[in-house]
Amino acid sequence: MEKYLDNAKVFKALGEPKRIMIIDMLSCGELCACMILKKFEMSQSTLSHHMKLLCECGLVNSSEKGKWTYYSVNTDTLNKTKQFLDDITNEKENCICKEDNSCCKGSNENE
């Protein structure tokens, strides 16, 4: 269940188009908050809110350099999220649907 909860946080963070655009920007490398802010018509506090959510779910790393905050994509979380999405969208032996299907026994006309 924990892997579903962790990934749900990532997907929820990506549920806002501007946050997806920020990830797109960061895919080219580390950026200062001021560079991200230049791209959008939003206040510093709104950007801070978006960055907080992206950092909390683990998609983005932040580091303080002087008075500026720099952001980068957390490739470990990104790769785990890609793998999770691949895992849940492909048929497999240990699929969650195969854990208990006793409620459906006898529903097949051939049984």
Image (cartoon, grey):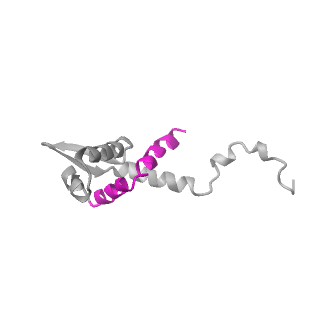
Query: Where's residue 50, x and y in %?
Result: 32, 47
Q: Main secondary structure of the magenta part?
A: helix
Q: Is residue 38 above or below residue 2?
A: below
In the depicted view, which residue is nearer to us: 62 or 52?
52
Q: What segment is highlighted magenta in the picture?
A: 1-28
Q: Is residue 67 above or below residue 41?
A: above
Query: Which residue: 20% across, 55% down?
Result: 35
Query: Which residue: 26% across, 57% down?
Result: 40
In the image, 44: left or right of 105? left
Query: Which residue: 34% across, 58% down?
Result: 21
Query: Where's residue 53, x and y in %?
Result: 36, 43
Q: What is the residue that sits farthest to the left in this orientation?
A: 66
Is 37 inside the magenta-drawn segment?
no
Query: Which residue: 83% across, 51% down?
Result: 107
Is 27 inside the magenta-drawn segment?
yes
Query: Where's residue 97, x and y in %?
Result: 67, 48
Query: Where's residue 80, x and y in %?
Result: 44, 50
Q: What is the residue that sits farthest to the top in this orientation?
A: 2
